Image (tube, rainbow, N blue to C red):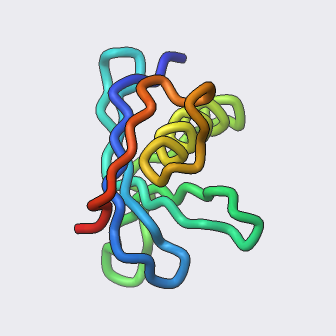
């Protein structure tokens, strides 16, 4: 599985939520509105979108196996590290740093 065009839009942190992410899977499927939360350890946790229908919550999309979830999480985590400046020049593709992060 190939994850490309990963984008991370930081927001003002609230209850651990720090950004929303999107990506393209295998040049064929766009996934958006992926919530990015921080864990107390500093790692990121992804929460995939759901929709409320009546009293039920329905998954809009989410990985159906662990390996797919790992690939998506690694790609989004790498981009988050770049955006939030948690990487050094050796670990970032373009060394991008954004000083005006929040919407």
In which quarter of the view is residue 89 placed?
A: top right
Choose between 89 and 82: the one closer to the eye: 89
User: On screen, 73 above or below 38?
Assistant: above
User: On screen, 55 above or below 95?
Assistant: below
Residue at left offset 44%, top offset 77%? 13
Q: Is residue 16 left or right of residue 10?
A: right
Which quarter of the figure is the C terminus placed in? Answer: bottom left
Residue at left offset 55%, top offset 55%? 46
Residue 87 position within the rendered picture, expressed as x and y whole percent measured from the top left: 59, 41
Q: Is residue 72 left or right of residue 13?
A: right
Which quarter of the figure is the N terminus placed in? Answer: top right
Residue at left offset 33%, top offset 15%? 27
User: On screen, 85 above or below 27?
Assistant: below
Residue at left offset 68%, top offset 68%? 39
Report how many numbered discs are placed on residues in the image: 0
Choose between 55 and 8: the one closer to the eye: 8
Choose between 60 and 101: the one closer to the eye: 101
Residue 49 position within the rendered picture, expressed as x and y whole percent measured from the top left: 40, 59
Choose between 54 and 23: the one closer to the eye: 23
Return the residue found at the far right.
41
Q: Is residue 51 left or right of residue 2?
A: left
């Amino acid at each position: 599985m190939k994850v490309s065009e990963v984008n991370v839009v930081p927001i003002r942190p609230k209850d651990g939520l720090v950004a929303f992410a999107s990506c393209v899977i295998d040049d064929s499927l766009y996934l958006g509105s992926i919530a990015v939360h921080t864990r107390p350890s500093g790692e990121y946790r992804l929460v995939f979108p759901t929709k409320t229908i009546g009293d039920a919550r329905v998954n809009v999309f989410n990985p159906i196996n662990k390996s797919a979830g790992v690939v998506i999480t690694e790609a989004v985590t790498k981009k988050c590290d770049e955006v939030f400046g948690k990487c050094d020049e050796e670990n970032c593709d373009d060394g991008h740093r954004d000083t005006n992060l929040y919407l």
